[in-house]
Amino acid sequence: MQSYIFLDLDDTLFQSIKKCAVNGNDPDLKALAYLKDGSPISYATAKQQWLWQWLSQGFRIVPVTARNHNAFNRVDLPFREDVILNHGAIILDKNRNLDKSWMRAMLASLPMYQEKLLDIWNDVEAHTKKHAGLNPRLISDFDTTWYGVIKHTDGNEMSLKTLLDTVIEPHPAIRDGSLYWHFNGNNLAILPKTVNKESAVSYLIESYRQHDGELLTFGAGDSRTDAPFMSLCDYALIPKNTQLSRLMATV
């Protein structure tokens, strides 16, 4: 029986140096992701490094990440399976070529959401021009704009929360479910309904079943928006001190 793990990356397998301090100032931190200029930005603790070694021995590891192609290429880990990028918008095969069937389906479904995304983005940009520190960016990959993300230069989550409460949540496209938001730390994203990790993972699981037969599947992730794809799997792994672990503690 083939075993697969669908693995979120940021805040699951590595995180910022600031978040590493929450895990006890681990003296054995290892840089695993880098900025465009080559400087390290994300680190794995000794436990996360051990987790990678353990998973590498028995699982086929499929990254499921919000990172685009360029940012994924700056992760220093030897991934050998398919890759899910941009919150599920893009799937690359083992040779790092586009999964053309998935891309065709995404490009067919996206136009009905793009106008609404650009409309809410106008409101977001109008708000950010009046509030210093907010940095909005539309994320494009493979010549297509998929979603938008807003960060704060000083990591001011309250400023992001105000934007969410006053501009994003009241927007009609959020209220009717055409768009949804993802907010975790210094990261506030607005995404079309069609762009999601759950659909991409479901697509790959079905593909693997057709090829391999019965599977053993694990899902690992840290955030609220990881939960739907993790629920498709036989088992779930949730790091402690994360958004998802805190939500689980309140159940």
Image (spheres, rainbow, N blue to C red):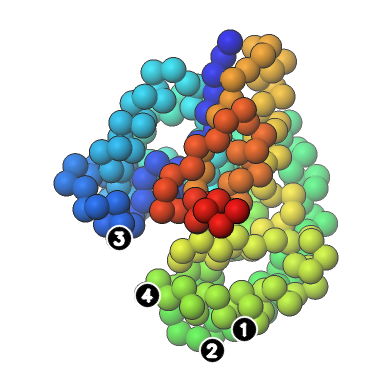
Q: Nearer the viewer, residue 99 or 27?
A: 27
Disc 3 to disc 1, how far (Cα)? 30 Å
Asked if labels 2 and 1 touch by Cβ distance under 8 angstroms, the answer is yes
- Name the residue: 36% across, 45% down: 14
From the image, which quarter does the N terminus lie in? top right
Among the two numbered marks 4 and 3 on one chain, the one whose residue lies closer to the N terminus: 3
User: Mark 1 belongs to which amino acid?
Assistant: Ala
- Report the residue at 27% width, 57% height from top: 21
Picture layout, residue 202 above or below residue 152: above
What whole-number distance in Å separates the C-alpha atoms at marks 4 and 3?
A: 13 Å
Report how far apart the C-alphas of labels 1 and 4 lie in the structure: 20 Å
- The quarter of the picture where residue 200 lies is top right
Name the residue beneath numbered marker 1: 126
Q: CA distance from mark 3 to mark 2?
A: 28 Å
* Label 3: how many Cα within 10 Å (few below 14, some 14–19, many 20+): few
Give whichever of discs 3 and 2 has the lower sequence position: 3
Mark 2–mark 4 CB contact (< 8 Å)? no
Nearer to us of marks 3 and 1 is 3
Q: Which residue position is annotated with label 2? A: 130
Question: Foreground: 178 or 215?
Answer: 215
Q: Secondary structure at mark 1?
A: helix
- The residue carrying mark 3 is 18
Q: Which residue is mark 4?
A: 154
Q: Earlier in the sequence, mark 2 or mark 4?
A: 2
The answer, for residue 8, to whether it is visible in the render is: no
Q: How many marks?
A: 4
- Mark 4 surroundings: few (<14), some (14-19) or many (≥20) residues within 10 A: few
**Of the residues shown, which amino acid type is indicated by label 4?**
Asp
